[in-house]
Amino acid sequence: MFKHFFAWMLASSLVLSVHAQNGYDLWLNYYPVQATAQKEYSNLLSSIQLDDTNPTQRIILREFEIAVRKMLNQSIVQQSNASIQLKKEGHSSLANLPAEGYILSHHYHKKKPVVTIYANDDAGLLYGSFRLLKELQTGGYRSQEKDIIDYPSIQYRVLNHWDNLDRSVERGYAGISLWNWHTLPDIIEPRYIDYARANASIGINTVALTNVNANALVLTPQYLEKVKALADALRPYNIRVVLTARFSAPIEIGGLKTADPLEPAVQDWWKKKTAEIYEYVPDFAGYLVKANSEGQPGPQDYQRTHADGANLLAAAVAPFNGIVMWRAFVYSNETPEDRFKQAYNEFKPLDGSFAENVLVQVKNGPIDFQPREPFHPLFGAMPKTPLMMEFQLTQEYLGMATHAAYLAPMYKEVLEMPTYRPDANATVARIVTGEQDKHTLSAIAGVANIGNDVNWTGHPLSQANWYAYGRLAWNPQLSSEEIIEEWIDQTYLLSQEATDILAGLLLNSREVLFKYMTPLGLHHIMGWSHHFGPAPWIDNMHRADWTSVYYHKADSTGIGFDRTASGSNALAQYAQEIQQLYGDKNTIDENFLLWFHRVNWEFKLKNGKTVWENLCFRYEEGVQEMQQLLNDFLSIQNEFGKEEGKHIEQLLRLQLKEAQWWRDACLAYFQSKNQRPWPSGFTPPPHNVDYYKEIQAKLKFVPGI
């Protein structure tokens, strides 16, 4: 059951701020507490003991002041022997507590509750403070509990912003970029601070400010002074900045004629440029690099390897304890090999060749952030190299900001998969945390879904993905259910029944989307370039793997991509146990059937129906289940603020409309290829495939390209 310590009553609407009505406050609403908890909370939150000359402890004080005012309509004062204490000594477990960890110690003094937050560093005190406030908001606070000891499982917990210097956002669906480069460094907008608060509350400690399709200008003094201003604002919240490094920067802004990583002049240029960055930002975390992918420059332009390129930058940041995050999302413009295989083929031979401060950043799946993918075969294949996960929060292939899709179940599906290298204990999560291969360096990245929309993420329910990513980056063992419970309890003021309904809606949302978009393992059948809407007919782009037909290969005889030994043999990149899991079309999880197998339209699935029949009814199930999600929300809509409730309703109605579009367009196309009769009892699409092609062709101004 969900825990609620907050009043649910009509009068509560009088104390809700305007921001709480429009989603600006995210999960930091700090709703008024129930009358039954008010006395205990009032005593606990009456005073605080900390060092307000310390920048981080000063913002801790500010956060408590905000929370206490909103939760109790009272103030909190500083004094010695206070009811809340921040300490870096005095607890026996501190000696073994990792960096950024904390201890919450609950006890009584003269019959009044006292909580001491212990940590070895200011970051731990910050995270412990947010943990206490979360416990108070969600009803998890218990004054007589044993000590709570918590610390992050992953060292660098990164938000990757694909933001450009002109404030456009690649794959951004929530407005323009947060970063107003024009007014920096002179103006630090309050929104930057609220962004930092939100990240700190869920443990995100690193931010890549700019797009992986990098612009070298961000490394020039003109922009470095702007980066410094942002870094200074974020630093008290334990957030360090990363910059995306364009590999050709020595040519574009350095005046060199080459960017060859083995050229001494290039090495010297990067060392000097990096030292310059550290003069502006002393705690600069390091570089994020996309190289030799989708036309980006890289070391292969000079017949060098990815390790050569990464090690060039690693040597430059090493004196400052910086890191390099080198993306493995690569595929050649010339190689006709199955795109599924190319990252593995390029990076697996380089295992052990990277400098010790390099992490290879690997997307969760081998293609590109599809609604469902098998885990990337590189996980488990490079034991000598720290591998970091790259998830996508922004819904590039999942309906953008018009579709509700709670992604924690997808993240968990990947993290919990065993790689079987060497055994079933070697899960993707254990590889990412470094535990499996005893790496001391660990990181995880999430491509941000944040813009300057008032509610940050465009779709109000998409805030849950930002929250869930941060929580799983801190602790990959958390469940999707407990995360959504936390988020709802902090974000909305709902009855228990409404909370349960909203949680169920969100927990089912991604699976519903999968059914009406890409059932049975279909993938990459979205609109070209913008990736919006159905377009399984795309067949005429300048590279085969930018078309839809490359991935589904539907014709009159069958459908699916054969990645077994009789096809591209991509399965061979996995351990034998995974090959067995996916290799038999008769026993495979049918959600991955068409990922790994090409089958005849008459091939029968486990329910006794053919692939064609199942495809039709899976699409139909997706639409019907989307209708149910809408109905579920309508049943609780009156518990939301009028404007936000209406906004969510409109979005869900649009999602239902687009789910029907997906169903009709895809099935009209596939039926045009197989010429099979429609299954008995199934309602065919109302138009032929040409009608749906025309709809897609008119989508000229889709955001986020």
Image (cartoon, rainbow, N blue to C red):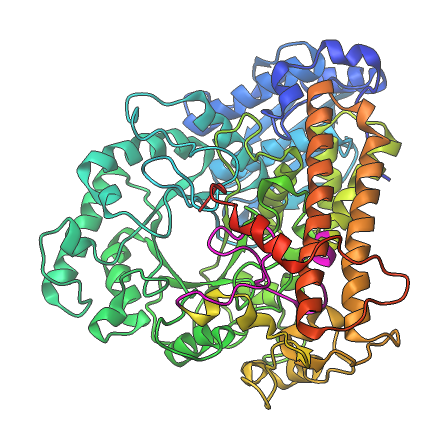
Q: Position of residue 112 (x, y in %)?
A: 75, 20
Query: Is residue 514 magenta-colored?
Result: yes
Q: Is residue 109 magenta?
A: no
In this view, 120 is above or below 430: above
Q: Quadrant of residue 221?
A: top left
The residue at 30%/36% (across/down) is 227
- Which residue appears at 31% of the width and 71% of the height? 307
- Span colored in magenta: 513-542
- The quadrant in which residue 581 appears is bottom right
Question: What residue lies at 32% left-to-right and 68% top-to-bottom?
Answer: 355
Rendered view: 509 above or below 313: above
Nearer the observer, 43 or 185: 185
State which quadrant residue 648 falls in. top right
Residue 653: % across, % down = 73, 36
What main secondary structure does the magenta stretch of the protein show? loop
Name the one closer to the observer, 704 or 326: 704
604 relative to 331 in the view: left or right: right
Instruction: Name the residue nearer the viewer: 385 or 598.
Output: 598
Residue 67, x across and y down, in percent: 63, 20
Can the viewer see residue 447? yes
Res. 46 in view:
no
Above or below, 283 against 195 in this view is below
For this orientation, the residue located farthest to the right is 681
Q: Quadrant of the N terminus?
A: top right
Total labels: the figure holds: 0
Q: Position of residue 556 (x, y in %)?
A: 67, 78
